[in-house]
Image (spheres, grey):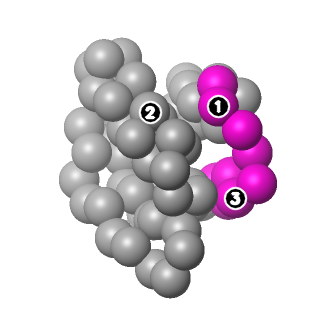
Amino acid sequence: MSDSTLDLRGVMCPINFVKTKLKLESMEPGEVLEVILDSGDPIQNVPKSIKEEGHKIVEVKKEGDFFRIKVQRN
């Protein structure tokens, strides 16, 4: 279960990470954000950047040509 969802399909790097970071900053520690990302650069870059910010990736699920990741805010 997630506390919030952000659909970033069609959003290019690094804008998708910026939007993810801003959304996480508005959430409470421990809450989970579900982020929907395109395959390719977005799924390679965004989770790495999220981890560098200190947040935890709790799930990565491939669905067709996009990915659903769940991030727990630190």
Q: Earlier in the sequence, mark 3 or mark 2?
A: 3
Q: Is residue 19 magenta?
A: no
Quick check: 52 above or below 24?
A: above
Instruction: Look at the numbered disc 3 and give the secondary structure of its residue.
Output: loop
| Residue identifier under label 2 | 45
Determine whether, in the image, residue 73 is placed left or right of residue 36.
Answer: left
Q: Kindly indicate the quadrant of the structure image that contains residue 22.
A: top right
**What's drawn in magenta, residue-wise?**
6-14
- Whether the residues at callouts 3 and 1 have beta carbons within 8 Å, the answer is no
- Disc 2 and disc 1 in contact, CB within 8 angstroms: yes
Q: Amino acid at mark 1?
A: Cys
Q: Would residue 65 be found to the left or right of residue 58 on screen?
A: right
Answer with the quarter of the image where residue 26 lies.
top right
Out of 11 and 56, give the one closest to the viewer.
Answer: 11
* Quadrant location of the N terminus in the rendered image: bottom left
Q: Which residue is mark 1?
A: 13
Question: Which residue is the site of mark 3?
Answer: 9
Residue 63 coordinates in the image, percent (x, y): 46, 80
* Alpha carbons under labels 2 and 1: distance apart: 8 Å
